[in-house]
Image (cartoon, rainbow, N blue to C red):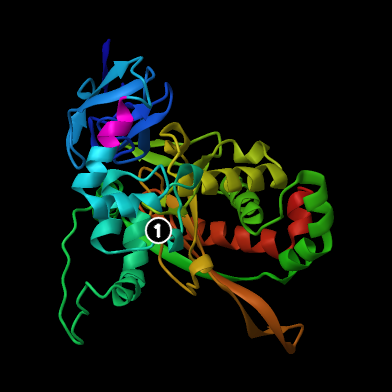
Amino acid sequence: MSIEIKVPVLPESVADALLSAWHKQVGDFIEEGENLVDLETDKVMLEVPATVSGVIKEIKVEEGTDVTEGTVLAIIEEGAAPAGDAAPAAETKAEAAPAAAQAESNDDVGMSPTVRRLVEENKLDISKIPATGKNGRHLKEDIENFMKNGGAKSASAKAPSVAAVPTGERVEKRVPMTRLRARIAERLLDATNTTAMLTTFNEINMEPVMSMRKKYQDRFTKTHGVKLGFMSFFVKAAVEALKKYPAVNASIDGNDIIYHGYFDIGIAVSSPRGLVVPIIRNADQLSLADIEKQIIEYATKAREGSLTLEEMTGGTFTITNGGVFGSMLSTPIINPPQSGILGMHNTYERPIVKDGQIIAAPMMYVAHSYDHRIIDGAEAVGFLVSIKESLEDPASMLLEL
């Protein structure tokens, strides 16, 4: 019996999706519930599982095609045997394309056609390429990043059939933006064009937080099963500051200002597809351990591309940490409709004056970008000073003194 596999119901506000990668080809056997194809939206990557077990009879849509809800993607012949009928076809394919078959022999089973084509065309050794996809699967971005970082050049040099690129050659490569990258570009441009954005700066002596982490790290890890990082302190400090300055936790809707009586903190996370901002909801009700666990969970999901739309929707304030990449100072861009964002940076030992003496201290510059339409300069500066005070005396913050 032939079964149609269709584009599922898309999340609210998502009109269409891009067919990113097939995980099976015509003639392949697939188990019920196994992922058949990835659909990329402007917010999340959706997996479309097989609804029945059987053999892929027909693929209706090619990779790189836009699809809408209900579009037929493939036909599965339910109950077809996985081995007997498929083996001769595989042998025929191997005879027709020995080079491709040889490349597949040392390939991981979950490689999509797009990834397989990139590997074969560039004569890459898949075993040397780090995989960031779910269950150790290689994504298209993994291959492109490997080649961008010189992997393709070194691999090509080992293959005598591929001519070396002449020194000084001016090479250009045009690739379409991913849905997520296009959405990021749209939102950032919208933020700069529709908000009265300003940024204020301050610096924080991180020695008290670092000392507390060092003192309690082992006990914290044994008790909670997770390491104590910097971000949970910043989330706590931000929540306390937002309570003092509610306008920073507010948003504009037309001619109205919406003051939020809750604290949903967005944490900017780097992923193979680009920057994503999952939300830690009700952060004021969470412990340091709860926050750390949620951050780790979101970071893992971001690398695997498994964040859900719900996990990235909403948020009243955002924190971004450019310091993990070595940034010393930046002006973060607001994530609309939010009115503020906190930028963390690299901690660097610098000379400061304390009690009339010059000492070396681990200092971090912090930045607060805000929408001047509803947040006055005094509030913006006061908000950042509050965060500074909380982090330079973390015991008082945690004891709510």
Few, some or many residues within 10 Å of mark 1 (<14, 14–19, 20+):
many
The residue that appears at 34% across and 37% down in the rendered structure is 23
- Observer-nearest residue: 392 or 24? 24
Q: Is residue 19 visible?
A: no
- What residue appears at the point 71 percent right and 49 percent down from the top-left corner? 226
Judge whether 277 appears above or below 395 on screen. above
The percent coordinates of residue 312 (x first, y second) are 44, 39
Q: Quadrant of residue 152?
A: bottom left
Depth check: 45 or 249 in front? Answer: 45
Q: Name the quadrant of the N terminus.
A: top left
- Residue 210 in the image, given as x and y percentages of width and height: 73, 67
**Height in image: 79 above or below 374?**
above
Residue 366 in the image: above or below residue 30: below
Query: Does the rendering let one see residue 157?
Result: yes
* Left or right relative to 85: residue 175: left
Majority secondary structure of the magenta segment? helix
Q: Residue at x 71, y 45 (%)?
A: 289
Q: Amino acid at mark 1?
A: Ile
Q: Magenta stretch?
A: 85-90
Magenta region includes residue 32: no
Residue most toward the top? Answer: 1
Q: Is residue 73 left or right of residue 393?
A: left
Q: Nearer the viewer, residue 155 or 186?
A: 155
Which residue does the numbered mark 1 point to in the structure image? 126
Residue name at image x 40 percent, y 34 percent: 309
Q: Nearer the viewer, residue 392 or 144?
A: 144
